[in-house]
Image (tube, grey):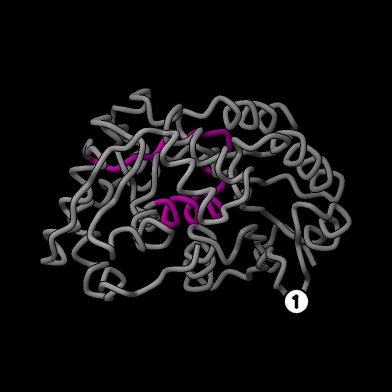
Amino acid sequence: MNRYDGTAPILVLGGTGKTGQRVVKRLIEQGQPVRIGSREAALPFDWDAPETWSPVVEGARAIYIAYHPDLAVPGALETVGAFVETALKSGVRRMVLLSGRGEEEAEQTEKMLMGSGADWTIVRASWFFQNFSETFLADAINTGEVALPIGDVKEPFIDVEDIADVAAAVLTDPAHIGKLYEVTGPELLSFSEAVASIAEATGRPIRYRQIPAADYRAAMEQAGVPQDMISLVLYLFTTVLDGRNANVTDGVDQALGRPPRRFADYARRAAKTGVWSAGTPVAV
């Protein structure tokens, strides 16, 4: 099997996650052979078990790298670096990294990949629309109040569907090698404005309330959230969301030749699924 003739699979790490499952869907629709990288896959992959890496990358022609839980966590740079080295030793050069916008640690991982000898593409994304419907924030919305330690800072939220469109395109077209696409939505919204858009889409009264970071930490501790996850969430909420990302980019248009989707359209689409119906729990 020639890994470059289109018959070799594209490995999608985090293939059951927010972006990964959508990338898999698009590649399959294109008729591309796909290998899902996850702990539950037929050929298991686990970031914390390096012995699982080589069997999964063997014979792949390209890899979509989505690191869980986030490139900002301690040790992520070293872990992803070791994985990239494993992939290169197995003969896989084409790698696409999902990165986080405004995260110093993520940018260090980007630089590592750029200097690794891989045929790289970086997709550097802003905060996902789907964080409001496919994580714990959906449960908060269902209670009628979203309380977070975030003020009026604006964020150019992006639809994960756009990220998946970009990833599927760059994985299958060598013209994107050596490109960094910083992808955002088309507008800046505060969290209060985003919640208001969801309230309008659902026809329900949902309010946003800013609370002190210490109160949010205490609430997560009371809920039994692990300390490492608490630290990550507070870092993202209080450091990354400090206004540093309060501008939009044309990364989606650069990669796809079209504008990104709008938040209000996403809110209406998600509301129709019933995910924000009161009392509907959402798994983290």
Q: Position of residue 100 (x, y in %)?
A: 50, 37
Front residue (pair 19, 193): 193
Front residue (pair 188, 112): 188
Residue 268 falls in image quadrant:
bottom left
Q: Is residue 3 left or right of residue 135?
A: right
Q: Position of residue 238 (x, y in %)?
A: 43, 30
Q: Residues within 10 Å of mark 1 (few under 14, many from 20)?
A: few
Q: Is residue 270 left or right of residue 64?
A: left
Residue 177 lies in magenta, yes or no?
yes
Q: Which residue is mark 1?
A: 42
Q: Is residue 164 left or right of residue 49?
A: left
Q: Residue at x 58, y 69 (%)?
A: 32
| Span of residues in magenta | 163-186
Up/down of 70 relative to 132, above or below: above
Q: Secondary structure at mark 1?
A: loop
**Amino acid bearing label 1:** Ala
Q: Is residue 247 left or right of residue 251?
A: left
Residue 216 lies in magenta, yes or no?
no
Up/down of 126 relative to 267, above or below: above
Front residue (pair 259, 80): 80
Residue 206 falls in image quadrant:
bottom left
Q: Residue at x 49, y 49 (%)?
A: 220
**Number of marks:** 1
Front residue (pair 147, 42): 147
Quadrant showing the N terminus: bottom right
Q: Position of residue 5 (x, y in %)?
A: 68, 62
Q: Residue at x 18, y 51 (%)?
A: 207
